[in-house]
Each structure stands twice: as C-alpha cells, then as structure tokens.
Image (cartoon, grey):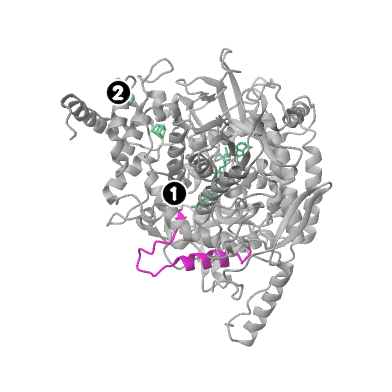
C-alpha cells in the first residue's frame, strides 16, 4: 500500500488547529508542532469577540457592509477577493464553532448574542462571555483531540520549529525542530508544511499585549530561507494598554466608550497623586483636540494623540511613558456592571482599584497586519476566493503555506476589532484545504527526497546551538530584548520619521551583532530556556529590521503606518461636494496611485530587499477615503 | 534597600534530587511572581552571591488564561502571573506542582491532563468542520450561564494538585476532567453521546474515586464549581447504572 501523504502544521492556535483539522478530514496524516500544549496558545488571550454578520438585532446589517468596513478600515490595502470570501463565510464558520461546543453568549431567545465593536455601525460581534478567544480555541482543540484519538493527527508539543527543509528544487519537504526538553534537533519529512505560528508583538519587547511566545521567530526563519514578508510596516498599537514590566495588558475600548476620560497633569513636574490633582490642573487632551468625538476617537487617533502628549509635549505622567485613563468620576455601580472584565484585570494585575484611582496606560504593540506573503486564486464567477485552489495561502516557496496572524492576508493597513479571530480561523481552514489539494497533485514519493537535505539542515541547526552554548560572550539576552523593545517602540512605533527609521536600522544592525556575542549564563543541556530564548531573540532583531526597512520605504500615511511628514488631512468642516474636500479627494487618489501597493520584503545579503505588488481592488474600488467624523 | 526574597525549590532534571536556593531582587511595586522570576533570570545570582543556572518555569499569556504558569506559591497552587508579590509573605516559597513529574525546576509535565480528556471523550462529535448551513440547537441564557462557568477551565492543574485522590500512581482522572464531561454532556448535540462519556467515568479512575473532600473547588483560579459538577455527574451515573442494568433506553 502507498504511504499516506503527510502535512506538518507548525502552531496550535486557531489558525494551526483549523488547518490541521481540515487536512486530517481530507484523509491525510498531520504532524502538529507547538512550543507548548496547544491549549495554551496566544489565541486564548482574545476577550472581545469575533465578527460575523447575523443581523439578529433588527439593524439590517449585511455581509456587504462587513466587507466594506473591513476594506475601508484597512485603507484598501488588503487584496479584496479573500476579504470578500472571509466575510461571506463568517456566519457558517461561527455556526461550525457552535456545533463544536463553543459557549457563545445568548439572548433571551437562546440565539447567539451580538455586540458592537469599534469602527462599525452595526452589532456584528459574536462573543463568549469575556473570553471569546479561549472558547474558540478550546472548541477546535477538542475536535483536534478527537482526530488525535482516531490516529489522524499526531502532536509534537514542546517542540520548536527551527527551519524548513528544501529539496534540490527549493520545494519544501519538511522541517527541522528542537525538542525543548532534551534539546535534540531532528528532521521531519512532510509533503507540505503549514506555518501558523502567530503574531510578533515581542519584537516590541514588553510593550506589547501579546503573549511572551508571540515572537515572530518562526516566520522570520522561513523568511531567511526565501519566503517573503508582506506589509510588515503595518502594526496596530492599542491606545489603552495597562503598563507592566513583564508585558502590557489590554484595557478594552469599552473603558473609553462608557465614559472614561484620558488626561495628564498640565505641569510635567506635578508629582501629586492623581486624585489630589484638581480639575483645572489636568489636561484632557483628547477632549480638547477632538471636541466632537472626545475620548472615543478611533484607536489609531487616540494612540497618536497620546504619543504627541508624551513625546512632543513632554507631559507623560511622572516623566514616564504613561497617561491616565480615568473612571473615578463615573458611578461605581454602573462601571462595575458594564466594565467588570477590565476592572477585574486591572485589580488583579495592578493591585489598585480603577473605581477609586485612575489607571495608568500607554499605547502598546497589539497586532501585526503584515506577515508572510501568501497567494490566492480568485474565482472569476463570484469575485471571491476560488475554494479548493492550491494557491490559496501558499507562500512563494512551493509546499509551504501560512495562515493565522503570521500571514498578511485580510487586514490591509489596519485591522478592524474582532476581525482577527475570524481571519485566523478562516485562513486556517482555507490553508488546510488548499494544502490537501496540493497533496493530491503531487507525483513524487516523499521518501525519494535525498537524506542529505535533512542531514545538512540538522547540522546547520546544531551548529547554531553550539555557537550559542559555547559562546562566552558578554551580552545578556534578556537585556538585549529590552533594548530591542525600547528601540522599536520609540523609533518604529506609533509615529514615524525617516531620519529616526534610518537610525533605527543602524541600531538594529548593531543589536544583531551584539546578539551574536551572547552569554547564556547557563550550561545545562536539558530544558535550557536561555538557549531557546536567544535563538528567538536573534530572529526578533532581524524581524525588527524587516519592519523598519518596510516602514522607511513607505512615504505616506496609511492605516496604522503614520509618517506625519506625508500626512493628508481632510480640511476642517468640508464635506463631499465642497471644492476643498474634492481637492483633498484628488490628492488622496494620487497618493493611492503611488502607494496603494503591497510591500514585499525578501531576505537579501545586506538585509531586506523591498519591492511592491499591486493590490486586487476588484470588489470595492477606492473612491471614498476613510472618514470617521 | 527594600528587597523581595524568594526560596525556590529546584531540580536540574527529572532524575536528579531537588534542592533549595534563595534569591533576592530589589523591591519594585507591582511585581507578580512571573515578572519577579524574569528579574532573577536576567541575573541569576543566589543570596549567597553564587551564580547559578536561571530558574526554569512556564509562562505565556501573562493574563491568567493560558494555564501555563501554575506553581505552588507559599504552599498554595496558583497562577504565578496573577499572584502579586505585594500580597505575599516573604520569603516567597516557590515549588513545582507535586502531582506531576518535574521536568526542571518549576516546570512539570502535565500531558496526563490531556490524555485523560481523551479518555473521557471530552469533545462534541460533529460530521465535519465544514458548514452544514445550520448551527447547533438554541441554548437558554440560564443554561449558557452554567455551561460558561465550566468552559473556562484552562487545564492548569491546580485542582488536581490539592485533590487527595489524584496522583502520579493513582488512576483518578481528577476534578477538571470530570467537569469537562459535565460540560460536554450539557451541549445540545453533545448529549447524544452522553452514555459513552458516562461509561468512561464509571470505569476505573472515574467518578467513584472522588472522596468528596472539596479541596479542588477552593483553589480553582477560575472559580469553577467543580463539586457541583461532580454532584450532578453522580446523579447521572446512578441513572446510567440503572439504565445499564435494566436495559432501558430512557
Ligand atoms: C490581548 C489580545 C486581545 C485580542 N483580542 C481579540 C479579539 O477580541 N478579537 C479578535 O478578533 N482578535 C483579538 N486578538 C488577536 C487574536 O487573538 C490573534 O490574532 C489570533 O489569536 C492569532 O491566532 P494564531 O492561530 O495565528 O496564533 P497563536 O494563537 O498565537 O498561536 C501560535 C502557535 O504557534 C506555535 N508556535 C510559534 N512558534 C513556533 C515554533 N517555532 N515552533 C513550534 N510552534 C510554534 C505556538 O506554540 C502556538 O501554538 C487579540 C490579541 C491580543 C494580543
Ligand atoms: S472533591 Fe473529589 S475531586 Fe475534588 S478534591 Fe475532593 S476528591 Fe478530589
Ligand atoms: S478546573 Fe480550575 S483548577 Fe482545575 S484545571 Fe481547570 S482551571 Fe485549573
Ligand atoms: S502565564 Fe498564562 S496563566 Fe499565567
């Protein structure tokens, strides 16, 4: 009998689990790799919800509106056919989750409840209490466990993906991975590999809301072996993250929505406790600068305003990077009821009570819109994805697929809240299906790939381990990551400037050199966490270079990428039809002619090489600029 | 200088003997146990001034939702990421969970939890992960409220740590796994396969091993009403036994 073909899935978050399921259901064998038990993946952190148009609130919500909101929110930078299909398939996907046992919150009638999320007008967000991501993850986790018990999926938890194995024709035929306990490096053969390794927030150090394992290292390894990155300059910063030395924690938009006010002391030297600072000595800058929206301006606007107050005006609380988010003027009973989850997190992790004392917050790296470049095939009949095509979610390396937050697919220049649990799940499903199609078309026998490709990759990886464990350098890997985080947050963050980006590139090269001269402080060859971390750190620094080079090359403001030197703003008090507005619209269109294109970064000898690709705009041509007034 | 003192139970690998080491870091407001361990790992020097290998431990989400960072802190199993140092007596004693094999220092191997979830078939049988153009049957808000309590179990292992019936050489699947059965049985279509799950927990290592000591429910960081689930399952199992005896289909 012929050996069944096999797919390796790297990553057990929503993206990875979905793709593993679909490959297994197509009748192929799956090896599923994860840094830890898949149930502990970062997807569990998402609280808010997942978007799908059910229109059960009498608002005449429509799938079309979901498509429009996603495309416009992303400043038209996303390829449109995949977005169209994602929004169309969302309700069916949610119902599948429901069948898997996900405990979605219910209305009085027992149907799934919907809530309102940022950037849209209709209620379109399904949620499960205050732990939507956790519940969705557990839903697929259970199904994967069932497939595991049927022998179709084999898990390799506590194994870290290190590199791809490419055959003589640069086709991906497996991976090397390291057992995180024994530190053994092994190769694994596969007919196709799917990367679903999640976000890269840790490149911004502890100033990120991501889990400590969201390093982007795995994607960067594939990049260095030839895979392209796309649009990595687009990083969403969440304006209101609670500070912490270990990581920052998300305080949801709801805090502002329910009446929270953001302020700093007018006098930067004012060291009084916030409650002792009288009204007239406070600067409510959002209310002052944006009289009509006040504290409820969109995420990116809020982040930039906070940045300006702290960095340009020097008004950060205690001279540090922080501002107050104040709920103390609100009725305690009311906020307890409406904002229970936020209050809970703040009390638990900060130890103080936001009902009585203003919270300290600052914008934090939250979501990478960019990631590994992936292809798609458009169905000319529907204008959406051609389902079952092996091109969907294929990277530029044959046999290598990518899905979830590590790809770049659906969010363009900015992500709509509650759209990424959707894209992670949907892209996982699609990637699994297209890998299955790819397998059907394969002719060669996997065992015919010469062993030498696997062996040489293993020795290359062992060599990296050896150079780190035997190095008696002077650099501390953890201090280096903090330096990386500070650099990225301050120079490649919310507000960007070409001179600073150029400096940042230089500093990153320096950091890369320093990361080659590490002292692991640890000699053990068993569960050596320093070794694992240092390897990831080196990749994070390289990834930082990709992000920075991409940001430097793009001379415009679009979505989350903000370079004030190239800003176009809507002239005040003008509306479509007014000559001033129409002149703005023309300027905006000219900017689109120059810059409405996908950034591609490929690994060159001296760092990233940047090129561009056109965007498929066949669903909604860019006629209307984003206007949140 | 104000400091934070730690005593940490260490073990180099699964086969070597444990030993204790003390560490001290400068005081800083707002530390949790994970962020303090991060300070130690950056400069792993004991109180006596000896440079040692950094302490190994598990963490990921830092928001008490992934379940990775469980350890015994001053005698109680808890999530290290949500345990604030300011609320603890010092020196703070850190130990690995004792009911699971130690990998290294504070890291343990909890894979058994997931094996047991397989044993009790803690999943919903679906025809496939594709769209069948309808969802699951409706769920009343009251039923949702109860189910949701259980669906937050993050397999952290704290409840198993304090359960007198749970241990490396005992077969009892433990409170969290039983609660998973309760949750799956309550799903509108999950209930179709209730009998299989009930039979699984009527076998060795199942429900009857619970001595009803109620320790589990007191330590669960997610306040999951474990003993309520165990009580409900007790009634279900009795009914199931009668059905099995008299061959009635309901
Ligand atoms: C605080 C927070 C709140 C959020 N809230 C929402 C929300 O309300 N709604 C929404 O839509 N989105 C939200 N998001 C975004 C969303 O959670 C993520 O985009 C999504 O969960 C990513 O899923 P994933 O499957 O791509 O990756 P992850 O869940 O991060 O999984 C990555 C997997 O890859 C594995 N892995 C990584 N590297 C390797 C390697 N080298 N070898 C082996 N395995 C590896 C890991 O073990 C893990 O299993 C939120 C994000 C954050 C940070
Ligand atoms: S009630 Fe049962 S499961 Fe809970 S601790 Fe006691 S013996 Fe263990
Ligand atoms: S029931 Fe509670 S204590 Fe037990 S594993 Fe689940 S979350 Fe942890
Ligand atoms: S790190 Fe996830 S629960 Fe503590």
Which of the four quarters of the rendered structure image does ligand 2 lie in?
top left
* Foreground pick, A323 / A592: A592
Q: Is residue B126 above or below residue A553?
A: above
Q: Are marks 2 and 1 on the same chain?
A: yes
Q: Position of residue A450 (x, y in %)?
A: 73, 30
Q: Which residue is mark 2?
A: B213
Residue at 61%, 64% in the rendered image: A305
Is any atom of residue A379 visible in this view? yes
Q: Is residue A413 above or below residue A434?
A: below
Question: Which residues lie in the magenta part?
Answer: A49-77
Q: Position of residue A386 (x, y in %)?
A: 56, 58
Residue at 78%, 41% in the rendered image: A512
Q: Describe residue A89's horizontal placement relative to residue A157 as left or right.
A: left
* Foreground pick, B62 / A168: A168
Residue at 71%, 75% in the rendered image: A590
Label 1: how many Cα within 10 Å (few below 14, some 14–19, many 20+): some
Q: Describe residue A104's horizontal placement relative to residue B9 as left or right.
A: left
Find out if the beta carbon at label 2 lies less than 8 Å from the nearest ligand 2 atom.
yes
Find out if the beta carbon at label 1 lies less than 8 Å from the nearest ligand 1 atom.
no
Label 2: how many Cα within 10 Å (few below 14, some 14–19, many 20+): few
- The residue lying furthest to the right in this view is A606
- The residue lying furthest to the front in this view is A1
Q: Describe residue B51's horizontal placement relative to residue A626 as left or right.
A: right
Q: CA distance from mark 2 to mark 1?
A: 43 Å
* Residue B5 covered by magenta stretch: no
Quadrant where the C terminus of chain A lies? bottom right
Q: Position of residue B242 (x, y in %)?
A: 17, 27
Q: Position of residue A19 (x, y in %)?
A: 53, 44
Q: Is residue A227 above or below residue B20?
A: below
Quadrant where the N terminus of chain A lies? top right
- Mark before the other along the chain sequence, 2 or 1: 1
Q: Which residue is mark 1?
A: B130
């Amino acid at each position: 009998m012929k050996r069944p073909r096999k797919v390796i899935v790297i990553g057990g978050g929503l993206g990875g689990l979905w793709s593993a399921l679909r490959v297994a259901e197509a009748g192929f064998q799956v090896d599923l790799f994860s840094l830890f038990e898949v149930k502990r993946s970062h997807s569990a952190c998402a609280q808010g919800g997942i978007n799908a148009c059910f229109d059960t609130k009498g608002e005449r919500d429509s799938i079309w509106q979901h498509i429009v909101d996603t495309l416009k929110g992303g400043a038209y930078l996303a390829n449109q056919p995949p977005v169209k299909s994602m929004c169309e398939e969302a309700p069916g996907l949610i119902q599948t989750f429901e069948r898997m046992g996900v405990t979605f919150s219910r209305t009085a009638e027992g149907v799934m409840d919907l809530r309102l999320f940022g950037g849209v007008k209709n209620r379109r967000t399904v949620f499960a209490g205050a732990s939507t991501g956790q519940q969705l993850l557990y839903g697929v986790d259970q199904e994967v466990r069932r497939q595991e018990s049927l022998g179709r999926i084999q898990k390799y938890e506590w194994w870290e993906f290190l590199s791809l194995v490419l055959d003589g024709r640069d086709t991906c035929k497996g991976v090397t991975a390291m057992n995180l306990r024994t530190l053994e490096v092994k190769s694994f053969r596969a007919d196709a590999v799917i990367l679903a390794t999640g976000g890269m927030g840790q490149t911004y150090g502890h100033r990120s809301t991501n889990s400590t394992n969201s390093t982007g290292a795995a994607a960067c390894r594939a990049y260095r072996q030839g895979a392209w990155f796309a649009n990595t300059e687009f990083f969403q910063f969440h304006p209101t993250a609670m500070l912490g030395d270990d990581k920052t924690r998300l305080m949801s938009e709801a805090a502002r929505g329910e009446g929270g006010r953001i302020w700093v002391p007018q006098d930067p030297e004012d060291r009084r406790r916030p409650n002792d600072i009288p009204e007239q000595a406070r600067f409510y800058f959002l209310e002052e600068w944006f009289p009509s929206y006040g504290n409820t301006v969109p995420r990116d606007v809020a982040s930039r305003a906070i940045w300006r107050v702290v960095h340009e005006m020097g008004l950060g609380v205690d001279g540090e990077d922080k501002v107050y988010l104040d709920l103390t003027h609100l009725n305690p009973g009311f906020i307890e009821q409406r904002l229970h989850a936020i209050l809970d997190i703040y009390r638990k992790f900060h130890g103080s009570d936001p009902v009585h004392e203003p919270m300290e917050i600052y914008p934090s790296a939250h979501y990478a819109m960019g990631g590994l470049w992936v292809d798609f095939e458009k169905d000319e009949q529907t204008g959406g994805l051609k389902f079952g095509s092996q091109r969907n979610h294929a990277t530029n390396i044959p046999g290598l697929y990518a899905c979830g937050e590590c790809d770049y697919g659906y969010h363009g220049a900015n992500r709509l809240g509650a759209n990424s649990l959707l894209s992670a799940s949907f892209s996982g499903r699609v990637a699994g299906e297209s890998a299955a199609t790819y397998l059907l078309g394969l002719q060669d026998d996997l065992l015919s790939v010469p062993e030498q490709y696997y062996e040489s990759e293993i020795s290359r990886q062992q060599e990296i381990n050896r150079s780190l464990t035997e190095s008696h350098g002077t650099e501390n890997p953890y201090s280096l990551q903090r330096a990386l985080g500070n650099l990225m947050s301050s120079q490649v963050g919310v507000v960007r400037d070409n001179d600073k980006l150029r400096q940042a590139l230089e500093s990153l090269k320096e950091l890369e050199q320093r990361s080659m001269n590490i002292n692991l402080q640890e000699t053990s060859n068993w569960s050596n966490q320093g070794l694992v971390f240092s390897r990831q750190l080196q990749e994070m620094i390289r990834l930082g270079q990709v992000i920075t080079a991409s940001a430097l090359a793009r001379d415009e403001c679009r979505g989350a990428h903000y370079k004030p030197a190239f800003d176009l703003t809507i002239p005040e008090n003008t509306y479509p039809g007014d000559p001033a507005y129409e002149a703005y619209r023309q300027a905006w269109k000219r900017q689109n002619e120059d810059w409405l294109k996908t950034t591609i970064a490929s690994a060159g000898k001296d760092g990233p090489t940047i090129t561009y690709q056109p965007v498929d705009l066949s669903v909604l041509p860019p006629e209307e600029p984003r206007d949140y007034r | 200088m104000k400091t934070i003192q730690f005593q940490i139970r260490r073990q180099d690998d699964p086969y070597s003997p444990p030993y204790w080491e003390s560490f001290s870091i400068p005081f800083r407001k707002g530390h949790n146990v994970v962020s303090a361990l991060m300070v130690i790992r950056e400069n792993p020097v004991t109180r006596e001034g000896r440079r040692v290998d950094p302490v190994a431990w598990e963490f990921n989400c830092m928001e008490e939702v992934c379940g990775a960072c469980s350890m015994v802190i001053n005698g109680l199993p808890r999530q290290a990421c949500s345990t604030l140092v300011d609320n603890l007596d010092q020196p703070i004693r850190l130990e690995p969970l004792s009911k699971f094999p130690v990998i290294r220092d504070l890291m343990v191997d909890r894979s058994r939890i997931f094996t047991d979830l397989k044993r009790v078939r803690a999943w919903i049988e679906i025809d496939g992960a594709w769209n069948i153009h309808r969802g699951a049957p409706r769920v009343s808000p009251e039923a949702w409220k109860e189910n949701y309590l259980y669906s937050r179990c993050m397999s952290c292992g704290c409840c198993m740590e304090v359960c007198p019936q749970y241990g490396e050489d005992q077969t009892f699947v433990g409170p969290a796994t039983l609660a998973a059965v309760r949750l799956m049985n309550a799903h509108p279509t999950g209930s179709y396969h209730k009998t299989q799950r009930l039979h699984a927990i009527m076998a060795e290592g199942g429900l009857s091993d619970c001595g009803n000591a109620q320790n589990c429910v007191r330590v669960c960081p997610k306040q999951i009403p474990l003993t309520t689930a165990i009580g409900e399952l007790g009634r279900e199992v009795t009914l199931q036994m009668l059905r099995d005896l008299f061959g009635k289909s309901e």
